[in-house]
Image (cartoon, helix red, strand yellow):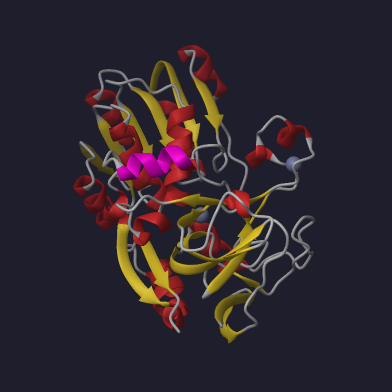
């Protein structure tokens, strides 16, 4: 079968590899659609650690792709909870099940946490084998395209659920990439009224407007915070940090009102400074969430019942053969792109 395997920095190859086979407790999934994520781009741009992952034992080259949907085509004899023909979305977290966090059910905080598609062969391939507890059934009215969006939606949905947001609150979202846009949809579904989105790309702000932002502000302006304070009569209840850099963190802290909250969702490449004096004066707090836990069924229900219409973040659909040029390079060079979906073809 064909698979897109990352050998190192900017070295992603479409190769013929052996079809994977199921072991005890596993299912084999024929992949329908897979989304390209910011963390895939990071791995592509910078390469990956040569060390084998402590749980998967796999080291590069690894087949990328952790946001994907498909159909179960084979199950191991001991798998009773899933069957052949089931349409599924994959929850790609790899965790030990033994550590302090895992024992408490906080598996996204596992000391050895990894991802199928970054630390073990993933969904940019015709077939994938995963543990049975990683697959979640999709109802008939959720398409495979939407199924591929369950994973990134879960990141935003989980952070919004874990934030202090109440219906009627005003929010600011810093960063209008896929996670920022899915956060926008999640806060809208949760009852936020004023939704202000900040990004340096006009095209992304256009997209944010289309998806329901009530105000968009160019990240290139000098007076971002001032504008937000004016629009909200003194600050937003919650600022969602979906960019992961110093200027957006600084603005997020400055944009929340008394008793407000900054929820950091982005992965930060470098440490950032926070104005503790501002937080103290406002009695505000900064918190963060990594990935998700125990929310895939809820996200699938939100999509199935029409409360989260996630299709709007898809900007392009391509074949696996074209993944480097029309997928990874397009995302790096074309800010119009949000979520690009990839289909493995025979
Ligand atoms: Zn991702
Ligand atoms: Zn663990």
Q: Residue at x 29, y 29 (%)?
A: 228
How far from the left and from the top, in percent, is residue 125?
Answer: 53, 74
Q: Number of labelled discs?
A: 0
> Residue lying farthest bottom?
16
* Quadrant of the snapshot with the N terminus: bottom right
Question: What percent of the width, then of the height, locates residue 192?
Answer: 29, 27
Res. 242 in view: no
Task: Give me the residue at 41% from left, 71% from top.
Answer: 342
In the picture, measured across the screen, residue 248 lies left or right of residue 16, that is left
The answer to if 182 sits in the magenta stretch is no
Which residues are drawn in magenta? 297-304
Question: Ligand 2 quadrant?
Answer: top right
Answer whether residue 302 is magenta in the image.
Answer: yes
Q: Nearer the viewer, residue 275 or 89?
A: 89
Q: Main secondary structure of the magenta part?
A: helix
Closest to the observer, 207 or 145:
145
């Amino acid at each position: 079968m064909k698979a897109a395997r990352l050998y190192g920095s900017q070295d992603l190859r479409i190769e013929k590899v052996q079809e994977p086979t199921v072991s005890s407790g596993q299912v084999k999934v024929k992949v329908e659609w897979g989304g390209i994520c910011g963390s895939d781009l990071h791995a592509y741009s910078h390469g990956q650690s040569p060390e084998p992952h402590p749980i998967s034992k796999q080291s590069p080259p690894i087949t990328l792709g952790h946001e994907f949907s498909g159909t179960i085509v084979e199950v191991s004899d001991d798998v009773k909870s899933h069957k052949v023909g089931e349409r599924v979305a994959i929850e790609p977290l790899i965790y030990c099940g033994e550590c302090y966090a895992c024992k408490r059910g906080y598996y996204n905080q596992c000391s050895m946490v990894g991802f199928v598609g970054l630390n073990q062969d993933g969904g940019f391939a015709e077939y994938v084998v995963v543990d049975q507890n990683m697959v979640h059934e999709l109802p008939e009215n959720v398409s495979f395209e939407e199924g591929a969006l369950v994973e990134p939606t879960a990141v935003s949905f989980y952070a919004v659920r874990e934030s202090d947001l109440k219906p009627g609150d005003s929010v600011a979202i810093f960063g209008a990439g896929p996670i920022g846009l899915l956060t926008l949809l999640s806060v809208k579904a949760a009852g936020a009224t004023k939704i202000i989105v900040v990004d340096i790309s006009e095209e992304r702000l256009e997209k944010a407007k289309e998806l329901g932002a009530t105000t968009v502000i160019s990240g290139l302006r000098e007076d971002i915070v001032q504008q937000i304070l004016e629009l909200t009569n003194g600050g937003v209840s919650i600022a969602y940090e979906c960019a992961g850099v110093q200027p957006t963190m600084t603005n997020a802290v400055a944009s929340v009102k008394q008793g407000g909250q900054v929820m950091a969702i982005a992965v930060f490449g470098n440490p950032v400074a926070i104005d503790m004096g501002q937080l103290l004066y406002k009695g505000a707090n900064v918190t963060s969430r990594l990935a998700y836990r125990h929310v895939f069924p809820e996200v699938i229900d939100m999509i199935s019942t029409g409360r989260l219409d996630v299709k709007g973040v898809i900007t392009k659909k391509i074949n696996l053969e074209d993944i480097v040029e029309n997928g990874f390079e397009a995302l790096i060079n074309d800010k119009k792109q949000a979520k690009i979906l990839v289909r493995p073809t025979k």
